[in-house]
Image: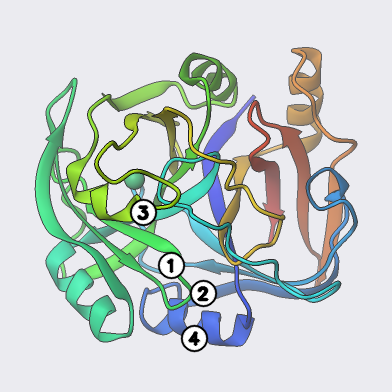
């Protein structure tokens, strides 16, 4: 069965038009694959209802194999509108905590995003990760709505295509979990079998993100990070904090990064296969008619820590 990595990361926004403009103009997600408004079926396990939403799926026309993932903008339209960003989220608490874009020329893209209104969270630095000593350049900014955007160029893996500095698609999604071994086993079953790196040291440039009263800045938690990759699609970066942070999943649809989808080629077969292996899949795959013969098929899965994860088969 082909699981094909992370398809997209979902980001809650308060104004899809403004977010399409920002992500399209400033980040390079210039292709709108669909822009749909309606009651989203199959989300009872995450949202407690079929929320009325506007969803726009964006792709970066310059995405390369190492930055292939999409961004899904979600604006909750019912109840009281988009739920707020989880309070006190630093990085690595249970919940989705970052979108990482592969870029060419981290410094150039970073400067451009800051000029476009992003807050600088970490200036560009070069590093290497163990156990394979893979080199990378990284930086962090926050989009205008507070989403942490990591910019990475995996210079030790792939230097990208020639051309000016530019952001590509999503390289990986980071999210907090509570037990690394259990998480690794779960995602291995979903195709994330290749370990790019594992780190147990606190990444010092992130220290300013861990603020009181949620954290004691003089006594920061240990960070255990791994990056399991699939042969295709974007990767995942599960993180365990020790001692554990508070639950930052928030309500489904909240502002900021909040869910992600794993691409499959046949969602009915994938759901049946997972169920056969004892992995909880919430009901039958749902089909959202996008018009013009296009469909978006999705089903929620029971991720070990209750992170909002779905399988997705896109026919658009
Ligand atoms: Fe990351």
**Residue 88: % across, % down:** 49, 55
Pointer 1 residue? 60
Q: Quadrant of residue 256?
A: bottom right
**Residue 46: % across, % down:** 78, 47
Provide the secondary structure element on which disc 4 rests.
helix
For mark 1, does the 10 Å Cα neighbourhood hold few (<14), some (14 to 19), or many (20 or more) residues? Answer: many
- Do tag 2 and tag 1 residues touch (Cβ < 8 Å)? yes
Q: Name the mark nearer the viewer: 3 or 2.
A: 3
Pointer 3 residue? 211
- Do tag 3 and tag 2 residues touch (Cβ < 8 Å)? no
Of callouts 4 and 1, the N-terminal one: 4
Provide the secondary structure element on which disc 2 rests.
strand
For mark 3, does the 10 Å Cα neighbourhood hold few (<14), some (14 to 19), or many (20 or more) residues? Answer: some
Of callouts 3 and 2, the N-terminal one: 2
Give the side of residue 60 with respect to residue 139, left or right: right
- The answer for how far apart the CA atoms under marks 3 and 2 are is 37 Å
| Dot 2 beta carbon under 8 Å from ligand 1 | no
Of callouts 4 and 3, the N-terminal one: 4
Up/down of 264 relative to 71, above or below: above
Provide the secondary structure element on which disc 3 rests.
loop
Q: Is residue 105 visible?
A: no
Pointer 4 residue? 21
**Residue 126: % across, % down:** 9, 48
- The answer for how far apart the CA atoms under marks 1 and 3 are is 34 Å
Quarter of the image that includes the N terminus: top right
- The answer for how far apart the CA atoms under marks 4 and 3 are is 31 Å
Of callouts 1 and 3, the N-terminal one: 1
- The answer for how far apart the CA atoms under marks 2 and 4 are is 11 Å
- The answer for how far apart the CA atoms under marks 2 and 1 are is 6 Å
Quarter of the image that includes the C terminus: bottom right
């Amino acid at each position: 069965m082909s699981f094909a990595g992370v398809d997209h990361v979902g980001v809650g926004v308060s104004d899809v038009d403004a977010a399409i403009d920002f992500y399209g103009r400033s980040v390079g997600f210039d292709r709108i694959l669909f822009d749909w408004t309606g009651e989203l079926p199959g989300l009872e396990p995450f949202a407690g209802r079929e929320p009325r939403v506007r969803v726009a799926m964006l792709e970066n026309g310059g995405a390369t194999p190492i930055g292939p993932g999409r961004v899904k903008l979600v604006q909750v339209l019912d109840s009281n509108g988009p739920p707020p960003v989880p309070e006190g989220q630093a990085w690595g608490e249970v919940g989705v905590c970052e979108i990482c874009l592969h870029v060419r020329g981290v410094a150039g893209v970073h400067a451009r995003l800051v000029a476009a209104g992003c807050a600088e969270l970490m200036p560009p630095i070069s590093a290497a990760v163990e156990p394979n000593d893979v080199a990378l350049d990284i930086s962090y900014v926050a989009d205008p709505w507070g989403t942490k955007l990591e910019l990475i160029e995996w210079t030790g893996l792939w230097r990208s295509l020639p051309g000016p500095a530019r952001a590509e698609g999503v390289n990986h999604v980071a999210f907090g979990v509570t037990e690394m071994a259990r998480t690794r086993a779960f995602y291995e079953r979903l195709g994330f079998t290749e370990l790019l790196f594992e780190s147990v040291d606190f990444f010092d440039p992130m220290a300013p993100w861990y603020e009181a009263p949620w954290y004691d800045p003089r006594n920061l938690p240990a960070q255990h990070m791994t990056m399991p990759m699939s042969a295709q699609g974007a990767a995942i970066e599960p993180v365990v904090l020790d001692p554990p942070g508070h639950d930052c999943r928030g309500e489904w649809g909240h502002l900021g990064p909040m869910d992600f989808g794993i691409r499959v080629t046949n969602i009915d077969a994938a759901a049946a296969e997972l169920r056969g292996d004892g992995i909880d899949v919430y009901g039958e795959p749902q089909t959202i008619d996008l018009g013009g013969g296009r469909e978006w098929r999705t089903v929620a899965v029971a991720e070990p820590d209750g992170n909002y994860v779905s399988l997705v088969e896109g026919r658009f």
